């Protein structure tokens, strides 16, 4: 499995891309310096957990 992270803007805004070319945007909340443009890390963790147990 290979995941590429591409910095988009700001300190915390990234786009993650898998081997199939599917993408998802990640960011932090504005209160800690993010721009709120994507999923936050804890949200991604919960999404992954839900996907594995579904």
Image: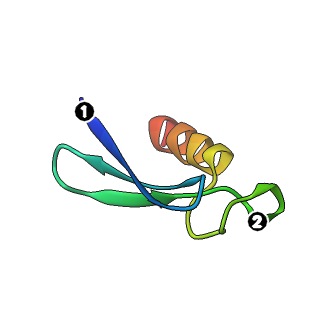
Which of the 4 image quarters holds residue 31?
A: bottom right
User: On the picture, is 2 further left or further right than 40?
Assistant: left
Q: How far across and down, in percent of the image, does residue 54 sit? A: 48, 43
Q: How far across and down, in percent of the image, does residue 22 sit? A: 25, 57
Q: Earlier in the sequence, mark 1 or mark 2?
A: 1
Residue ID at (32%, 59%): 23
What distance separates the C-alpha of mark 1 from that of mark 2?
Answer: 29 Å
Which callout, 1 or 2, points to the residue nearer the camera? 2
Q: As rendered, which of 19 and 30 lies closer to the eye?
A: 30
Residue ID at (57%, 61%): 10
Which of the 4 image quarters holds residue 27?
A: bottom right
Is 41 located above or below residue 36 in the figure? Answer: above
Residue ID at (46%, 35%): 52
Which of the 4 image quarters holds residue 19?
A: top left
Count numbered badges in the picture: 2
Furthest residue toward front: 10
User: On the picture, is 21 further left or further right than 12?
Assistant: left
Instruction: Mark 1 and mark 2 in contact? Answer it, CB < 8 Å.
Output: no
Q: Which mark is residue 2?
A: 1
For the residue labelled by badge 1, is the local secondary structure a helix, a strand or a loop? Answer: loop
Is 2 located above or below residue 14 in the figure? Answer: above
Q: Which mark is residue 30?
A: 2
Q: As rendered, which of 13 and 42 lies closer to the eye?
A: 13
């Amino acid at each position: 499995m290979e995941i590429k992270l591409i910095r988009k803007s700001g300190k915390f805004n990234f786009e993650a891309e898998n081997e199939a070319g599917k993408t998802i945007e990640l960011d932090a909340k504005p209160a800690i310096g993010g721009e709120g443009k994507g999923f936050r890390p804890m949200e991604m963790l919960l999404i992954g957990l839900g996907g594995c147990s579904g």
